[in-house]
Image (spheres, coloured by chain):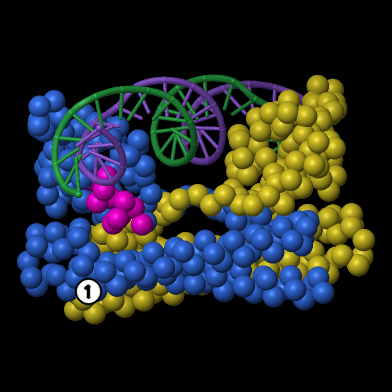
Chain colours: A blue, B yellow, C purple, D green
Amino acid sequence: MSLRYALLALLRVGPLSGYELQKLFSESVGHVWHAPDSQIYPELRRMETAGLIRGEEQTRGERGRRRIYHATEDGAEAFFEWINEPMEYSRVRDPAHLRAAYLESAEPEAAREFLADHARQHTELLDRWQSEIDRILSGEHPMLQRRLLAIPESERERAIAFKVFAYEGLVERAKAEIRWAKRGLRLLGDLNP
Amino acid sequence: MSLRYALLALLRVGPLSGYELQKLFSESVGHVWHAPDSQIYPELRRMETAGLIRGEEQTRGERGRRRIYHATEDGAEAFFEWINEPMEYSRVRDPAHLRAAYLESAEPEAAREFLADHARQHTELLDRWQSEIDRILSGEHPMLQRRLLAIPESERERAIAFKVFAYEGLVERAKAEIRWAKRGLRLLGDLNP
DNA sequence: CTAAACATGTAAAGCGTTACATGATTCG
DNA sequence: CGAATCATGTAACGCTTTACATGTTTAG
């Protein structure tokens, strides 16, 4: 259900075609909630059926067509309901730490690979999120820029502060994962001399 | 697919009935990978069909029955393949941080609730994981005790060190989430005087 | 003219969630 | 004899992944 609200979050700022939405998605909310286009297009159709958005068919050239979506009143309302309602936390289900719990049974080389890979993965994520923060602070973030134009100037600083705060949480978590994986590599070295 | 290997991890230590498995599951691997019994029983059947485990029907009293499962050679092999193979990391999909990214649009009271709840959730997880570490170190952990009896003494210290290490990663992550949520609460206070 | 970008989907399979469903045995 | 524990599932629904599928337009 989160995809729906992630899409509404973009659409509330202004109308977009499915394609534009999908592009903007992957370089904004997509850093927090991945979705491939094969999931976005059908979801847009379902949202339209549900009355949250409305799409208008446009022609492009001779035979080309595209659908421009905008959020309806119901859609805006649904977004605010979602953002204000208490979160439902799902149960723990963590593949990496499940593996880690049985690392003693792995071959040392495989264990080393696992931990090095874990550090690598989270370093990549860290870089992505860190550069999002940089783009937000430098005013280069395309989606945020559009959003800021839609709200009164007095609220802009607040909006920026919250965005940065959200990404900082991810950055801190990634750092914790990297520290942990590196400590694991040292542990491995100590236990397999 | 992880559930399958979590179950094999328990079964490789010795035979267990579905019920025993489910109980031990919830107080060991279940801290890292949640699964309800309605998922465990059918999965055991599928694993049996796949030849990874074998079940023997027992009677209990007059009409009672239960099925005792043990891992087959194929099952043990599948477990080792899994633990030694490179992890596939799934794409980011983080409901809490998605919400956080749009917290500026929430009512201040709802934002405060969200962050307080986030801290609460992760404090609960932290306590669970921390007490798992305590149980591992004090030798009270039932599943680990069984496992330790199945391996040579020389490897026991190593097995304990890895188990603790796995849970420490979760503990550190939970601490990072709590710090973040609390910083968010301070931020909220500053922005909504 | 050809590659890149624009544009939009369908289908099948797997995994997980939630709710429902039922009964036996043992302990106090 | 009643409650707790033992014991095992089914059914329906929804989300995600992956693979497949197809065509148009524009810029160089």
The residue closer to the viewer here, B89 or B45, is B89
How many numbered dots are placed on residues in this image?
A: 1
Where is residue A109? Give x, y as percent: 74, 61
Bounds of the magenta span?
A21-31
Type of the residue with mark 1: Ser
Examine the residues drawn in magenta and state their main secondary structure.
Answer: helix
Q: Label 1: chain?
A: A
User: Which residue is at the far left?
Assistant: A152
Residue at screen point 77% across, 47% down: B80
Which residue is tagged 1?
A138
Where is residue B138? Give x, y as percent: 78, 70
The residue tagged with tag 1: helix, strand or loop?
Answer: loop
Instruction: Mark 1: give few (<14), some (14-19) or many (20+) Cα within 10 Å.
Output: few
State left or right for residue A103 relative to residue B145: left
Q: Which image quarter: residue B160? A: bottom right
State left or right for residue B152 relative to residue B182: right
State left or right for residue B155 relative to residue B134: right
Residue at screen point 15% across, 29% down: A64
Residue at screen point 81% across, 42% down: B76
